[in-house]
Amino acid sequence: MKIPPVSTLGRFVVQRKVGKVNQTLPPEIPSLKSDTVSFTSSFAYYLKKYNTLPNEIKKVLKPQDAVDMFRNMEYIERGLSKGHKIGQGKHSKVYINPWLEDYFVLITKEGFPTEQTIYSRYGLGDSVWFDKDNELIQIIKKA
């Protein structure tokens, strides 16, 4: 995103003189060394999550793909996106994870028990990762 130098904006002031309007400019400000702005805070947030993944997942998942995967999981949990649901239990739902072939996404409800019965036509394994910021989001392995 391009930003104009601050010195070109100027400041206009009306002084209390009859019939005269004066334009006063601020003193010369040195121009910015860089005229681009980048917003990397969200990428850094997801990169911290990427570092908590097990090594077996890090071997097959690139960091940029992990950012997309984490965003998608959060959108599904909030109800902003519909994932491809493959299983359901009383307290949870299981979705296909398009970024990881051998893993699924498990979204649970608050107050879930430690063991659950989930009905699915796929073989489901144990949880290998959970989001520390939102424990309702987990990654489970295919059986």
Image (cartoon, rainbow, N blue to C red):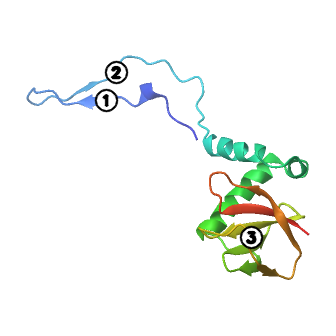
Q: Picture coordinates of residue 20 (x, y %)?
A: 15, 28
The kind of residue tagged 3 is Glu
Crowding near pointer 3: few (<14 within 10 Å), some, many (20+)?
few
- Given the image, on which type of amino acid does mark 2 rest? Pro
- Residue 70: x percent and y percent? 71, 56
Q: Secondary structure at mark 1?
A: strand
- Circles 2 and 1 in contact, beta carbons < 8 Å: yes
- Identity of the residue drawn at 51% across and 22% down: 31
Name the kind of residue labelled 1 in the image: Arg
Give 54 or 99, whichever is nearer the viewer.
54
Q: Are marks 3 and 2 in contact (CB under 8 Å)?
A: no
Query: SS class of the residue under badge 2?
Result: loop
Alpha carbon of mark 1 to alpha carbon of mark 3: how far? 66 Å
Q: Nearer the viewer, mark 3 or mark 2?
A: 3
Residue at 83%, 61% (x, y): give it: 99
Residue that badge 2 annotates: 26
User: Could you give the CA–CA distance between mark 3 and mark 2, rounded to whole angstroms?
Assistant: 67 Å
The answer to whether 39 appears left or right of 9 in the picture is right
Q: Which residue is mark 3?
A: 115
